[in-house]
């Protein structure tokens, strides 16, 4: 399925342990896709291990690239974050430039999807890594959303609250100014009600950490979202 129609995705961290059984439950849950990605400890080895274990299911799988060294063929999509509110410019365009110098000639652009990230939780790992030290307020977020939609014409605007549940008013404000750019919401979804609340506002909700803390609760988020009309 085109990622434009994704309503729900699980984010699986290659640096964390997960059993085959849990992976099977995620893959067969009815989610629209699995995103393989994390902020640290991602290696070619752990990405390949996860890919091999997931590829036996038909669910679409995307690699969210955070290190060029861990890129490998075999994924349906390659999500490339550009952190619009990073202060370390390598996370806006630096790593991308280095990667394109080396691999630009052999990339299949059909599989590549750029994500304009706006990191709101300044305490999360991704914020520390990319140098986000100021919490963007609603006006900031709206401006970044417009930047994604109108200036850079990015296919995805990713509102990243990783580790904390976001402010619905801010998510709503971002949604209001997006038309062609899809709104991904991620952060702190721990149960069906959280998922439903954010899925009312965002195009796609991404569920991460709760997979490792309470798999059954994580699985309830799929049905909660897939049974809604949008
Ligand atoms: C992380 O947006 C995702 O990149 C999901 O966040 O781990 O808090 O669910 P959580």
Image: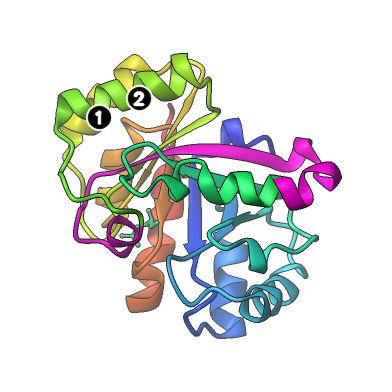
**Nearer to us in this view, 145 or 59:** 145
| 81 is higher (above) or lower (below) than 181 | below
Which image quadrant: the N terminus?
Answer: top right
Looking at the image, do the residues carrying marks 2 and 1 touch, with CB atoms under 8 Å apart? yes
The local crowd at label 1, few if under 14, some if 14 to 19, many if 20 or more residues have their Cα within 10 Å, is many
**Residue 101, numbered circle:** none
Q: Which mark is residue 141?
A: 1
Q: Residue 86 in the image: x percent, y percent? A: 33, 44
Q: Residue at x 14, y 33 (%)?
A: 137
Looking at the image, which residue is at 30% across and 17% down?
A: 176
Image region (quadrant) for ligand 1: bottom left
Residue 169 occupies quadrant? top left
Q: State which quadrant residue 128 falls in.
A: bottom left
Q: Is residue 150 shown in magenta?
A: no
At 77% from the left edge and 51% from the top edge, which residue is drawn? 103
Is 90 left, or right, of 127 in this rendering? right
Residue picked out by circle 2: 145
| Magenta extent | 101-129
> As drawn, is 70 to the left or to the right of 195?
right
Residue 158 in percent (x, y) is at 41, 39
Between 224 and 82, the residue placed more toward the observer is 82
From the viewer's side, name the closer residue of 164 and 228.
164
Label 1 within 8 A of ligand 1 by Cβ:
no
Q: In what element is the residue under mark 1?
A: helix
Asked if ligand 1 lies within 8 A of label 2, the reply is no
Relative to 63, say whether 20 is above or below: below
Q: Position of residue 161 (x, y in %)?
A: 27, 50
Crowdedness near tag 2: few (<14), some (14–19) or many (≥20) residues, C-alpha within 10 Å: many
**Residue at left offset 43%, top offset 26%:** 230
């Amino acid at each position: 399925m085109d990622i434009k129609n994704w309503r729900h995705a699980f984010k699986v961290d290659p640096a964390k342990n997960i059993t085959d059984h849990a992976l099977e439950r995620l893959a067969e849950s009815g989610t629209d896709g699995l995103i393989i990605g994390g902020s640290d400890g991602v290696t070619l080895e752990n990405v390949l291990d996860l890919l091999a274990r997931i590829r036996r299911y038909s669910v679409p799988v995307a690699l969210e690239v955070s290190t060029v060294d861990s890129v490998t063929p075999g994924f349906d999509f390659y999500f490339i974050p550009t952190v619009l509110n990073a202060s370390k410019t390598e996370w806006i365009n630096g790593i991308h430039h280095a990667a394109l110098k080396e691999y630009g000639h052999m990339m299949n652009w059909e599989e590549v999807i750029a994500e304009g990230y706006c990191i709101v939780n300044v305490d999360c790992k991704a914020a520390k890594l990319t140098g986000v030290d100021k919490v963007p307020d609603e006006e900031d977020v709206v401006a970044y959303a417009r930047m994604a939609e109108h200036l850079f014409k990015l296919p995805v605007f990713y509102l990243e609250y990783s580790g904390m549940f976001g402010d619905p008013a801010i998510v709503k404000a971002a949604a209001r100014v997006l038309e062609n750019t899809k709104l991904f919401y991620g952060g702190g979804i721990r149960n069906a009600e959280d998922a439903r609340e954010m899925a009312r506002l965002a195009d796609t909700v991404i569920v991460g950490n709760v997979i490792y803390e309470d798999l059954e609760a994580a699985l309830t988020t799929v049905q909660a979202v897939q049974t809604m009309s949008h």
